[in-house]
Amino acid sequence: MKTRIISAAVAIAIAIVVLALAHTWVFNLAIAAITVGALYELFKAFGLVKYKIECAVCFTFAAIDCLIGMVQKHNFFTFFNVKLYGFLFVIAIMLLYLKNHNEYSYVVPFSLIGATLIVAYSFHTLLWLVEYYPDFGVFATVLTLAGAWLADSGAYFAGTFFGKHKLCPEISPKKTVEGVIGGAVCNGLFLLIIAAIYGGLINKDADVHLGIIFIAGILCSIIGLIGDLTASEIKRQAGIKDYGNIMPGHGGIMDRFDSVLMVAPFMYWMFSQGWLVAV
């Protein structure tokens, strides 16, 4: 327990610094590191890290996708957009497949491409929140992360005191239907409180739509659960307990960000529609 608390405290301190520097290159570097780290953990679980060159190509694409914006905002290399480097990424993986077709089947290149594109896109939506909404991008990012993570607290207490019906015992034995419901409601309330503080004390000019944020919190809990269960099933099939040990007591990046992978694109879409906040 002591190790978990220390790890969490360090992670929170780092997160605060990164968010405080959200409009600088530090945020892009942090998201790039998280994206590449998550991909490495997934590839290790898939048994794909032995294909070092192919993995390096995937990591390079993910890093470029996160970092190229720092250069392009100064009007450099604007031609080198995702349509181009995404195409080059796929071509590179296909060429490696043709070169090494006797060593592995088509499952390998398409698993690498699929995982890379999904993970890179999901985490990139956090960059878009800050880039496209400079007036409230940090708040949007905090609300998104809260939507992915805080449901676990409500689910834990609801499941502990009221849990009777197992949700999916083969994948996650401890999760209950009552816990999921309690977590969803609590998540809505948590996001509502965060939004109320932001709109009432931090940015009084922001038009924060509290009712919709409450509903978004409930939906985030369910969407995040899908990411959580999917990541858990991958671990079960891969025969591993955790994806890594970068956070002692908490596991790897994927253990902490599995829900974020699903919630971030959803929340980005909600913000892009102007349903959650407007300035």
Image: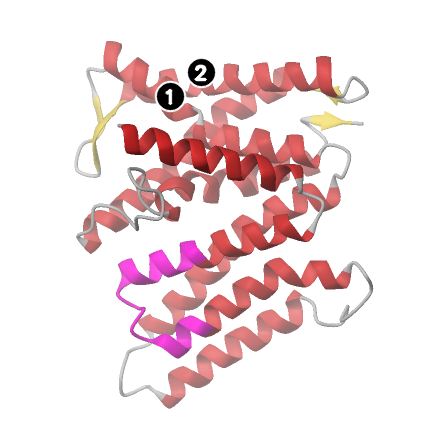
Find numbered disc 2 in the image and state the secondary structure of the residue it sits on.
helix
Does the segment drawn in magenta span residue 49? yes
Residue at the spot 78% in from the left edge and 17% down from the top edge: 204
Q: Position of residue 114 (x, y in %)?
A: 43, 62
Q: Position of residue 173 (x, y in %)?
A: 18, 31
Q: Are marks 1 and 2 in contact (CB under 8 Å)?
A: yes
Task: Spot the residue most to the top.
Answer: 161
Between 135 and 11, the one nearer to me in the picture: 11
Q: Position of residue 233 (x, y in %)?
A: 25, 46
Q: Amino acid at mark 2?
A: Cys
Left or right of residue 68: residue 45: left
**Crowd band around label 2 with a 10 angstrom C-alpha radius: few (<14), some (14–19), many (20+):** many
Q: CA distance from mark 1 to mark 2?
A: 8 Å
Labels 1, 2: front one: 1
**Crowd band around label 1 with a 10 angstrom C-alpha radius: few (<14), some (14–19), many (20+):** some
Find numbered disc 1 in the image and state the secondary structure of the residue it sits on.
helix
Left or right of residue 246: residue 138: right
Looking at the image, residue 140 lies above or below residue 36: above
Q: Position of residue 177 (x, y in %)?
A: 28, 21
Looking at the image, residue 181 lies above or below residue 123: above
Q: Amino acid at mark 1?
A: Ser
Residue at the spot 65% in from the left edge and 15% down from the top edge: 197
Residue at the spot 76% in from the left edge and 21% down from the top edge: 203
Q: Which residue is mark 2?
A: 186
Between 144 and 227, the one nearer to me in the picture: 144
User: How many numbered badges does the structure rendering display?
Assistant: 2
Q: Which residue is mark 1?
A: 153
Magenta stretch, residue numbers:
37-56
Residue at the spot 47% in from the left edge and 74% down from the top edge: 57
Query: Where does the C terminus fall, quadrant-wise?
Result: top right
